[in-house]
Image (cartoon, rainbow, N blue to C red):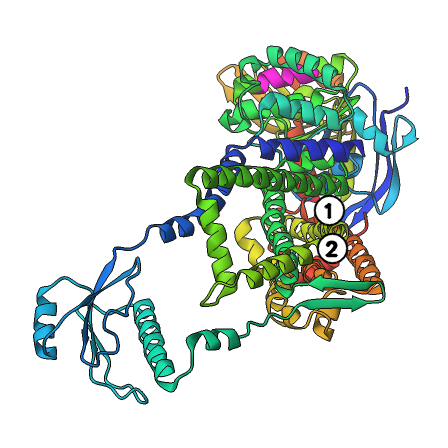
């Protein structure tokens, strides 16, 4: 299947520094795609290129196979990190205005605003001024404004900042629902637990360059340290050169250990070795979290 | 184009529906009407009649001083000391003392008062005493007052503009007045609504809506829609003011019958003469009317609209750029100065040099430079400006606003996405050459 977005060799220079250096990746259709990186890595520059706020100095971007063009704006929904609303404008009018700027007809917009307001419990607020709303409610309004025109590609920059846990869950569920309906989501955040929870693919940018790319599972397996948590009864004594014991605790007849395999050795070999000597109650691979991978990648650079 | 129209609608509707707009629209004409009516009303409230005691030892003025609404003369007798003593006991305004005087060299006339006398009262007394003494002198010299009246010759020069097409009466006061009103309106409009553009952009920046906006609208469309929307707000307000002001002042004038009075007042001041001369007055009014009729009204209105919009667009774009470059209104001062200086300068120069010499070199150059031409040209127009100068000035203004809009759009495009950065002129000039 054709990727919804292809980014090919994109560079962006500012006067004093280079914001992006030959960044390339594809965003598969229907996925939730995590765009990760520390502050100042160039994420916002990249997002601004995709949303056509700025243009790349080098490289090309394709939307559904076509070079990015102004009319593609109508297929993209963008929730920036620095976001706000016109304070002195009524919520409903503001949503209609933003929708019409994205090419929607007024009647359609009004219709869909009603549906969304119902879904997010904003109905009685549509006639209020934005400044009368709480911050969380304003965030909901911004979210509606982003998705109202049913974009094929949704770009969310820190979508959960400013939400309480309850509302964050509501928004998360809505994002997942949109994905089910075929929407592709690019998700830029520092919250690694939500990346772990939601993303299918990730790309990591550090110091203007792409440093990591792939599906979440793939990336994790790449960063695996071949280490296993083992628990059981008996006295554990590992003497084989195939296994390296990183830590071990013995409480009477109960043991707990962290064992690393040598590169060419598989987990079954460890199990076999253990079964002959002790009774195994717990055997689990230590999988690195995205958080660990993030920290490791950034500090390595 | 659709998007500019959408932005235009929003900018217009949001402002027009604001409470402050409605309040200002109603209060504006009330204030203006107040400014016009209050002085007239105050003038109609004649002060209390002031009583002036007159001690005339010369005998020239006995019963001659005529009491008016403001001043009432009462003759007193006795010596100066007695008169002074009795005056102190009274509550009268003043005591006028005329000693025995030499008609050729009248000296020693004094005015005693408990409070300081006003200049107007002193003037009025001096005038009356002088007239009476002159009359006595006329009588003594054998010159008949009637003969003298005949000799007095009022002169009023009728000014005529002579050109190949024929003669046209002109009136310097009318011409200057018309030009000045046009120039002032342009100046006022640019200042009030230019600042609104700037504030609008700053508001969008501080409310962080801009990044959402520019992902669906081009910065230029946003700027253009905003500038035009605010212009429409201004024009609406001006129009409402004109309608309401004329309605209110018309209504009030009719009710209190102030109109007759104020007309009389105006005529009086225009005359500035001691005696009414109906023929002359009629002549002068005729001059004013015919001068007004001789103004090329379609040309004036047409070029007013042109310079009005041209000047507004030129300055509006710059105000928008300043708004984009700063984070808050307090930071805007350093960039406001170079914008406001040519505007203020043109208005000051307009009042002095250009009124004195509407076709001189200063006037010429200032009406060519796009930053000053809207105000200056309005002032020169009623005096008649050669066609080629007019065309050149208009062309330069159009080029000028295209240029400033280009500059402003570039600053705007970069500026609106910059937060928390103190910007200086060097930085701004770099923004001009940033790539898309």
Q: Is residue A172 magenta?
A: yes
Q: Quadrant of residue A229?
A: top right
Tell me if residue B96 comes above or below residue B221 in the rendering.
Answer: below
User: Label 2 belongs to which residue?
Assistant: B431
Which residue is nearer to you in this view: A199 or A214?
A: A199
Residue located 52% across and 22% down the image: A164
Q: Is residue B178 magenta?
A: no
Q: Horizontal and vertical percent for residue B91?
A: 14, 61
Q: Horizontal and vertical percent for residue B398?
A: 80, 54
Q: Is residue B420 left or right of residue A66?
A: left
* Quarter that holds the N terminus of chain B: top right
Instruction: Report how far apart the C-alphas of labels 2 and 1 lie in the structure.
Output: 9 Å
Q: Is mark 2 in CB contact (under 8 Å) with mark 1? A: yes
Residue located 63% across and 31% down the image: B13
Tell me if residue A52 comes above or below residue A178 in the rendering.
Answer: below
Q: Residue under mark 2: which chain is it in? A: B
Q: Horizontal and vertical percent for residue B138?
A: 38, 81
Tell me if residue A162 comes above or below residue B42 in the rendering.
Answer: above
Residue located 42% across and 51% down the image: B40
Mark toward the start of the polypeptide (2 vs 1) = 1
Tags 2 and 1 both on a single chain: yes
Residue located 51% across and 74% down the image: B150
The stretch in magenta equals A168-176
Mark sitting on residue B413: 1
Mark sitting on residue A283: none
């Amino acid at each position: 299947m054709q990727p919804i977005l292809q980014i090919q060799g994109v560079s962006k220079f500012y006067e004093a520094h280079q914001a992006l250096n030959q960044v390339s990746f594809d965003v598969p259709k229907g996925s939730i795609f995590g765009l990760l990186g520390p502050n100042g890595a160039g994420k916002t520059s990249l997002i601004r290129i995709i949303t056509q706020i700025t243009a790349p100095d080098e490289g090309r971007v394709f939307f559904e196979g076509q070079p990015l063009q102004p009319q593609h704006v109508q297929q993209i929904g963008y929730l920036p990190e620095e976001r706000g609303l016109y304070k002195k404008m009524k919520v409903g009018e503001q949503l209609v205005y933003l929708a019409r700027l994205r090419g929607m007809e007024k009647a359609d917009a009004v219709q869909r605003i009603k549906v969304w307001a119902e879904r997010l419990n904003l109905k009685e607020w549509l006639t209020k001024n934005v400044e009368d709303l709480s911050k969380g409610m304003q965030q909901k309004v911004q979210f509606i404004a982003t998705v109202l025109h049913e974009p094929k590609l949704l770009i969310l920059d820190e979508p959960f900042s400013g939400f309480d846990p309850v509302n964050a869950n509501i928004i998360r569920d809505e994002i997942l629902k949109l994905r089910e309906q075929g929407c592709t989501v690019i998700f830029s955040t520092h919250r690694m637990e939500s990346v772990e929870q939601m993303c299918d693919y990730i790309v990591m940018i550090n110091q203007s360059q792409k440093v990591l790319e792939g599906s979440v599972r793939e990336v994790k397996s790449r960063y695996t340290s071949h280490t296993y948590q083992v628990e059981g009864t008996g006295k554990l004594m590992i003497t084989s050169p195939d296994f390296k014991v990183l830590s071990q605790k013995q409480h009477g007849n109960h043991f707990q250990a962290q064992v690393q395999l040598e590169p060419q050795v598989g987990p079954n070999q460890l199990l076999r070795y253990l079964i002959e000597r002790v009774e195994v109650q717990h055997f689990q691979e230590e999988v690195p979290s995205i958080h660990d991978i993030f920290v490791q990648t950034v500090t390595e650079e | 184009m659709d998007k500019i129209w959408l932005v235009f609608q929003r900018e217009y509707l949001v402002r027009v529906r604001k409470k402050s707009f409605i309040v200002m629209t109603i209060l504006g004409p009330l204030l203006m009407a107040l400014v016009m009516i209050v002085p007239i009303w105050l003038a109609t409230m004649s002060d209390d009649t002031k009583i002036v005691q007159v001690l005339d030892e010369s005998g020239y003025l006995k019963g001659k001083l005529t009491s008016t609404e403001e001043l009432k003369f009462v003759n007193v007798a006795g010596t100066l000391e007695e008169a002074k003593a009795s005056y102190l006991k009274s509550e009268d305004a003043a005591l006028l003392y005329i000693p025995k005087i030499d008609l050729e060299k009248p000296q020693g006339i004094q005015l005693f008062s408990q409070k300081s006398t006003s200049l107007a009262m002193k003037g009025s007394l001096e005038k009356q005493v002088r007239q009476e003494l002159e009359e006595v002198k006329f009588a003594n010299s054998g010159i008949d007052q009637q003969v003298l009246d005949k000799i007095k010759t009022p002169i009023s020069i009728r000014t005529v503009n002579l050109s190949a097409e024929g003669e046209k009466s002109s009136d310097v006061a009318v011409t200057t007045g018309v030009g000045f009103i046009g120039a002032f309106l342009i100046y006022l409009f640019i200042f009030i609504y230019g600042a609104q553009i700037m504030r609008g952009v700053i508001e969008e920046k501080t409310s962080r809506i801009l990044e959402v906006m520019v992902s669906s609208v081009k910065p230029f469309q946003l700027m253009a829609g905003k500038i035009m929307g605010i212009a429409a707000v201004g024009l609406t307000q001006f129009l409402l003011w004109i309608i309401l002001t004329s309605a209110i002042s018309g209504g009030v004038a009719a009710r209190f019958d102030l109109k007759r009075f104020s007309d009389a007042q105006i005529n009086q001041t225009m005359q500035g003469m001691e005696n009414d001369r109906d023929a002359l007055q009629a002549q002068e009014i005729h001059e004013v009317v015919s001068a007004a009729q001789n103004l090329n009204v379609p040309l004036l209105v047409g070029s007013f609209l042109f310079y009005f919009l041209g000047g507004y667009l030129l300055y509006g774009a710059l105000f928008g750029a300043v708004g984009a470059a700063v984070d808050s209104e307090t930071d805007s001062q350093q960039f406001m100065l170079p914008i406001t200086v040519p505007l203020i300068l043109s208005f000051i120069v307009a009042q002095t040099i250009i009124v004195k010499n509407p076709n001189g070199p200063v006037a010429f150059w200032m009406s060519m430079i796009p930053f000053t031409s809207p105000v200056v040209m309005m002032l020169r127009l009623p005096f008649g400006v050669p066609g080629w100068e007019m065309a050149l000035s208009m062309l330069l203004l159009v080029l000028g606003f295209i240029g400033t809009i280009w500059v402003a759009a570039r600053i705007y495009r970069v500026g609106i996405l910059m937060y928390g950065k103190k910007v200086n002129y060097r930085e701004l000039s770099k923004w001009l050459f940033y790539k898309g």
